Amino acid sequence: MDIYKKNRVGQGSRGRGKTISKNSESRGQQRRHMVTNTKKETRFQWFFQRAEMSDGQYDPETGTGLLCIEELSKKDKGIYRAMVSDDRGEDDTILDLTGDALDAIFTELGRIGALSATPLKIQGTEEGIRIFSKVKYYNVEYMKTTWFHKDKRLESGDRIRTGTTLDEIWLHILDPKDSDKGKYTLEIAAGKEVRQLSTDLSGQAFEDAMAEHQRLKTLAIIEKNRAKVVRGLPDVATIMEDKTLCLTCIVSGDPTPEISWLKNDQPVTFLDRYRMEVRGTEVTITIEKVNSEDSGRYGVFVKNKYGSETGQVTISVFKHGDEPKELKSM
């Protein structure tokens, strides 16, 4: 005998009710079920395809069971079951989220996504000019976007890129030219809902975007070509006296950077026991028959017209029979 108040909400389903809540503030879905005639020991469980789900919520004060699914996708297709049970028995309610039911949710999410689209914004980038709109949800299967320039449909090509993410629809114009000026329109279709957004890429808007493009392009060139110490130097090098120390690092830069070494912030003079060798991008400093006076903080300094950088290493020389400092501290 059933012990919970029941209200049939579909063939084979029991429970006070079931609700699919479409949350316009996110890309997720909420499934909410209400139960009554419970007691402290009553247990509420969620199941998906007969497997129990651990991320469901239940509030015994209100009798509300809530299951949130973030970024709903086709993998969430299936049968959902909410079950309450205690020593008096059990009761459940079932939601069939397959076929038309799932399509209806995606169609509604698409409609919400289209209506949530923000006005088009223009942005200068390192590669060119980007025009985009933010959305609360986007699904490539249930939403379609089309871009127009001066009312002529645009297709992706050598200089035009279009794309979407879960929260953005964008158009990227590479290597912009004067011919790219004019009105741009984004058309978003989701079911019967069709929305158009437009912006004018001309005048001051074009000049501002081009200025930002040139600024970022220049910064990218500087960052790519500036002198750098790419890899190779350890933080600390420990060596016994009278041994030969070799330190090698890799540098980069265009034009080829000037290279110098410092010891305790003072230039190293390469005479007698000190040698430096440069082979392409590989730089090696060699110190023969090291002694305690060679201990200190060393740096390789690289510089060209685009910038400079210093890679540092601390050298510690210990005497015969002693342990390296890092071993003594262990």
Image (tube, rainbow, N blue to C red):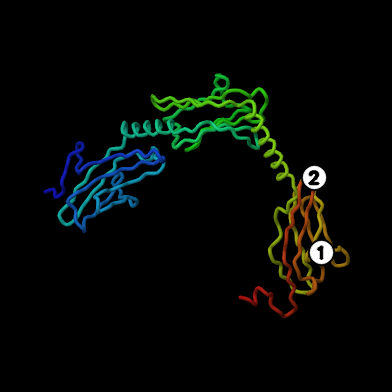
Image: 49 above or below 113:
below
- Say which of marks 1 and 2 sits in front: 1
Q: Earlier in the sequence, mark 1 or mark 2?
A: 2
Q: Quadrant of the C terminus?
A: bottom right
- Mark linked to residue 175: none
Question: What residue do we see at 47% from left, 32% from top?
Answer: 117
Residue at numbered disc 2: 255
Q: Residue furthest left?
A: 1
Front residue of 71/271: it is 71
Residue type marked 1? Gln
Kind of element beneath mark 2: loop
Q: Position of residue 263 (x, y in %)?
A: 79, 65
Image: 173 above or below 288:
above
Residue type marked 2? Pro
Question: What residue do we see at 58% from left, 30% from top?
Answer: 161
Kind of element beneath mark 1: strand
Residue at numbered disc 1: 266
- Mark 1 packing: few (<14 Cα in 10 Å), some, or many (20+)? few
Front residue of 321/189: it is 189
Question: In this rendering, would 151 be left or right of 4?
Answer: right
